[in-house]
Amino acid sequence: MNDLDSLVETARQAFAESATPADLENAKAQFLGKSGRMTELMKGMAQLSPDEKKSRGAAINLAKQAIEAALTARRQGLAEIELQLQLQAEALDVSLPGRQRGQGGLHPVSLTLERIEGIFGSMGFEVADGPEIETDWFNFTALNTPQDHPARSMHDTFYIEGNNEQAPHLLRTHTSPMQIRHAIAHVKRHRAALDAGQTMPEIRVIAPGRTYRVDSDATHSPMFHQCEGLWIGENVSFKDLKYIFTAFCRTFFETEDLVLRFRPSFFPFTEPSAEIDIQFQQGPLAGRWLEVAGSGQVHPNVVRNMGLDSERFIGFAFGMGFDRLTMLRYGVNDLRLFFDGDIRFLSQFQ
């Protein structure tokens, strides 16, 4: 083996022992760098004769090409090793179950709202929505609630600070103001027909939404949901109220085995008035009477505040807390669970 073959073999061994790209570059410098072994051999050719230079130069070039080929092969080998290490570090076990983002769902109260709107929508009722910060007139006065009524007390109602004492604003205590707002807008649209003595389309509307009262315990919340209903026409009776609400309850709870009781009561905006109780005939609540709504024939003063002739138009209204209906439908015994935000509880309704 001549000196050039020995040099090539030494370079290959040095490259093979290089464990990292940095080590390989250091080994390259020993053989192919400006001060490397190949450079020294090229410089030594100056003392040779022309014929010797020709043969020696060809041999040195072949040795240099062999060293460069060994260097390239080792670079590729180190790159492959690094790639394999990376693939091993990032390896996926395809036999494991896939990771999926959890699917969300509607809140149980929202599910109840959708159900209520769907049932009453099938009976021809519109859905009305309006402001949660309401005026005293729409919340109380227009609904025949006198100044000395307990509901106007600061102990029961959240009043807005800093507003006009002559026209105070408050967080609505029920969604009944939307009955007035909707009825007034309805009457305005048909005023010409009314003035001409013609028939006006009936007012048939529900008003679901958030309401606020100063109250908090296992069955009451300062913010709660309520749904008011109103049907005004020229020939709407208490019989229609009983039929509509009975049909609603039996559809909502998906059972015909349900008894309703209309118990005499008092509300300033209806006369006569009735509390509505339901009784399940089967299940854990069988035999118990449960109050679910208040109702009654709309008071003539309220009809007049809608801009209608109380001698010509009559109707009924009802109001129910659909948080209570949600509790009954799903068997929940603490209202606060709906608002705690506990994903373990809420995920049951997805």
Image: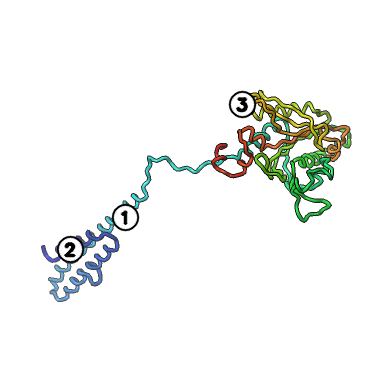
Residue 124 higher or lower than 51, as above or below: above
**Quarter in which the C terminus is drawn:** top right
Is 84 on the left or on the right of 158, as rendered? left
Residue 333: percent from left, percent from top: 62, 36
Snapshot quadrant of residue 277 = top right
Is 178 on the left or on the right of 50, as rendered? right
Q: Which residue is mark 1?
A: 82
Residue 170: percent from left, percent from top: 76, 49
Which residue: 63% across, 42% down? Answer: 336
Q: Amino acid at mark 3?
A: Gly
Q: Secondary structure at mark 1?
A: helix
Which residue: 21% across, 71% down? Answer: 39
Snapshot quadrant of residue 222 = top right
Q: Amino acid at mark 2?
A: Thr
Task: Identify which residue, 121 or 28, lies in the foreground.
Answer: 121
Q: Secondary structure at mark 2?
A: helix
Is 335 on the left or on the right of 207, as rendered? left
Residue 128: percent from left, percent from top: 73, 40
Residue 22 higher or lower than 228, as above or below: below
Q: Amino acid at mark 1?
A: Glu
Snapshot quadrant of residue 110 = top right
Q: Which residue is mark 2?
A: 10
Residue 295: percent from left, percent from top: 77, 33
Q: Which residue is mark 3?
A: 283
Question: Label 2 to label 1, Cα distance in Å?
Answer: 25 Å
